[in-house]
Image (cartoon, rainbow, N blue to C red):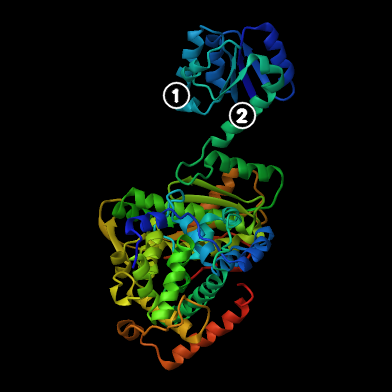
């Protein structure tokens, strides 16, 4: 159950809060902000509700201090404001939302729900692609495992991304990452609008979840689209030459061909998974295999299937 | 003679946000939007048949928000990058052109035939992205749409002048506006961050020798434009078929049978598209 920390010394209000959140959230009530701190630091609640009393600078300062740490930046704070509160002072409070004391009965629960909903939505979105990151990815996989749903999991990354970045600079590299995220999302969602998922692990690593019957089609289309779009990201001279000059990880000058995309695929029909870590591990293994081939391709680990090592030749 | 200040003209053109389509397309649009099973390929094919929808999609995908400024010149790439939902949303905002209905539907047909011819020639010449050339063929005359839209009376006068004095519409435009549809189209294409090659084709399709970055693509669209006029598909604002540019002709080096193939494929495709306008 999600946890709300309530900082409030108004007994009547505390009773109302307990009553309205009962069964929905676990509410932990503190009289003063300093005593709530220990709990907040140790268990990171889903929401802090603070009953603002005029002239309580300590509580305000503590809230603001908490929120300067990146670990707590996403932690939403909902302020209950006394009706005579000067709304201009709201700027000095680092809160995500507020509610007037007189509106408490009507609005409180809805505001709590919305504050938590918003904070979960913005947690962990990759700023570049706006795709969800690792925590959401793990959650998406684990949820499907627990519900015993069949699914296929694709793990993609780019070949020779680093030399491209070094050659053209990171803003051109960012363009490629954005493009890749967008095209994987576009293709996966067009194949399966409901129940599919696309995430961005970071760097040039992407994952997607899709129905087993659709996964190879999707991978084939992603490869085809990537290969035809990527040439537009290079300068013409480099394209004509067919490679770029850059340095490898040891600093040695080398020639690198045009980027490709390698995709590893695993699926639940051939393996009974119980933990998300195993899914990503197997897909990563398949991706490693795909990377050994020059150019874009995907590798699927349907082990009982002899055709598993299909290679897409463009 | 022209009494339009070029600065005013350019300013007005650059403030255009969207181009209208013809009623026939709008009728089919709702079926496309409401179809929950439509695929990216189907929706791209529909969009590629209409200059207004194509510019809308290219404008969006090449805007800074999606992060591919000046990079995407094909509709299928654009739909893939934007995704079905955004594409459907974009299509909802299309308006119809009621003004000068007849001239517009003629231009529509002309553009469509030109897109087909450009694609076939690009394939014959072994270009890597025939779809991008097809888009260039479809959009080469957007300047005419823009001028008709922003200056209906003046453009009608230009068309009358071309017919009356037996000069080309290109020259009549110069007299009326101090600029041609090729200039006007490229201004907007530039403002919307279209890829460089596409802008150049729009700008140079009447003077293919001036093309620096995409001489081949420009020559193809130039040739397609003339073939479509000669074959009599649609109406490009004049009855006159200009002469083929010698440099473009040599660059393309099309055989007689190549040209026959282009014409045949154009005819086959245009028959199925006839009910649109």
Circle 1 crowding by C-alpha within 10 Å: few under 14, some 14–19, many from 20: few
Question: Disc number at residue A69?
Answer: 1
Residue B45 lies left or right of residue A249; in this view the side is: right
State the quadrant of the N terminus of chain A: top right
- The percent position of residue A153, horizontal first and vertical second, equals 59, 53
Vertical order, A175 against A49 (above or below) = below
Question: In terms of image quadrants, where is residue B167?
Answer: bottom left
Q: Is mark 1 on a helix, strand or loop?
A: loop
- The percent position of residue B18, horizontal first and vertical second, equals 50, 57
- The percent position of residue B108, horizontal first and vertical second, equals 53, 72
Of B191 and B243, nearer the camera is B243
Vertical order, B54 against A80 (above or below) = below
Which residue is depicted at the point 32% across and 86% down? B250
For mark 1, name the chain.
A
Of A87 and B214, nearer the camera is A87
Dot 2 or dot 1, earlier in sequence = 1
- The percent position of residue A261, horizontal first and vertical second, equals 46, 59
For mark 2, name the chain.
A
Q: Do the residues labelled 2 and 1 touch (CB within 8 Å)?
A: no
Question: Disc number at residue A116?
Answer: 2
Q: Is mark 2 on a helix, strand or loop?
A: helix
Question: Disc number at residue A148?
Answer: none
Q: Are marks 2 and 1 on the same chain?
A: yes
Q: How far apart are labels 2 and 1 at the CA level? A: 19 Å
Residue B200 lies left or right of residue B63; in this view the side is: left
Which residue is depicted at the point 47% across and 22% down? A67
Of B54 and A193, nearer the camera is B54
Of B79 and B246, nearer the camera is B246
Q: Can residue B102 be seen in this view?
A: yes
Circle 2 crowding by C-alpha within 10 Å: few under 14, some 14–19, many from 20: some
Task: Please state the total of marks drawn on the protein image.
Answer: 2
Question: In terms of image quadrants, where is residue A17?
Answer: top right
């Amino acid at each position: 159950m999600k946890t709300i920390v309530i900082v409030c010394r108004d007994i009547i209000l505390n009773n109302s809060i307990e009553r309205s959140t009962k069964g929905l959230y676990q509410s932990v009530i503190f009289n003063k902000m300093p005593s709530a701190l220990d709990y907040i630091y140790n268990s990171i609640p889903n929401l802090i509700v603070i009953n603002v009393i005029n002239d309580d600078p300590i509580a305000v300062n503590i809230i603001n201090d908490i929120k300067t740490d990146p670990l707590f930046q996403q932690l939403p704070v909902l302020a209950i404001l006394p009706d005579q509160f000067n709304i201009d002072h709201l700027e000095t409070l680092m809160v995500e939302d507020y509610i007037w004391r007189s509106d408490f009965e009507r609005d409180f629960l809805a505001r709590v729900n919305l504050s938590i909903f918003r904070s979960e939505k913005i947690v962990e979105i990759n700023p570049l692609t706006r795709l969800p990151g690792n925590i959401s990815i793990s959650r998406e996989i684990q949820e499907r495992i627990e519900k015993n749903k069949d699914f296929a999991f694709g793990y993609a990354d780019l070949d020779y991304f680093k030399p491209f970045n070094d050659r053209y600079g990171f803003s051109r590299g960012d363009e490629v990452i954005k493009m890749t995220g967008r095209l994987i999302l576009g293709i996966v969602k067009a194949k399966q609008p409901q129940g599919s998922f696309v995430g961005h692990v970071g760097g040039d690593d992407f994952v997607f979840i899709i129905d087993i019957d659709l996964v190879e089609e999707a991978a084939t289309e992603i490869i085809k689209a990537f290969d035809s779009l990527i040439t537009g990201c290079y300068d013409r001279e480099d394209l004509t030459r067919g490679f770029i000059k850059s340095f490898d990880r040891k600093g040695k000058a080398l020639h690198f061909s045009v980027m490709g995309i390698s995709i590893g695929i695993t699926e639940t029909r051939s393996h009974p998974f119980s933990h998300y870590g195993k899914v990503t591990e197997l897909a990563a293994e398949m991706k490693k295999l795909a990377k050994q081939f020059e150019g874009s391709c995907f590798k699927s680990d349907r082990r009982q299937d002899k055709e598993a090592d299909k290679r897409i030749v463009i | 003679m022209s009494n339009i200040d070029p600065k005013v003209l350019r300013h007005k053109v650059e403030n255009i946000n969207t181009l209208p389509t013809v009623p026939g397309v709008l009728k089919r649009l709702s079926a496309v939007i409401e179809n929950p099973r439509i695929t990216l390929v189907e929706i791209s094919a529909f969009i590629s048949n209409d200059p207004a929808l194509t510019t809308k999609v290219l404008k969006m995908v090449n805007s800074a928000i999606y992060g591919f400024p000046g990079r995407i010149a094909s509709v299928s790439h654009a739909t893939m990058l934007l995704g079905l939902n955004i594409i459907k949303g974009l299509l909802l905002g299309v308006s119809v052109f009621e003004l000068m209905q007849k001239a517009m539907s003629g231009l529509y047909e002309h553009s469509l035939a030109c897109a087909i011819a450009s694609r076939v020639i690009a394939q014959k010449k072994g270009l890597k992205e025939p779809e991008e050339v097809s888009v260039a063929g479809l959009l080469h005359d957007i300047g005419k749409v823009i001028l008709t839209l922003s200056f209906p009376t003046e453009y009608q006068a230009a068309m009358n002048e071309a017919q009356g004095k037996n000069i080309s519409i290109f020259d009549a435009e110069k007299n009326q506006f101090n600029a041609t549809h090729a200039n006007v189209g490229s201004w907007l294409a530039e403002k919307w961050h279209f890829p460089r090659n596409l802008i150049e084709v729009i700008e140079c399709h009447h003077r293919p020798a001036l093309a620096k970055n995409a001489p081949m693509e420009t020559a193809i669209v130039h040739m397609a434009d003339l073939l479509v006029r000669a074959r009599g598909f649609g109406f490009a604002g004049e009855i006159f078929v200009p002469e083929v540019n010698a440099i473009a002709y040599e660059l393309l080096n099309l055989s007689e049978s190549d040209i026959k193939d282009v014409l045949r494929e154009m005819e086959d495709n245009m028959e199925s598209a006839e009910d649109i306008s």
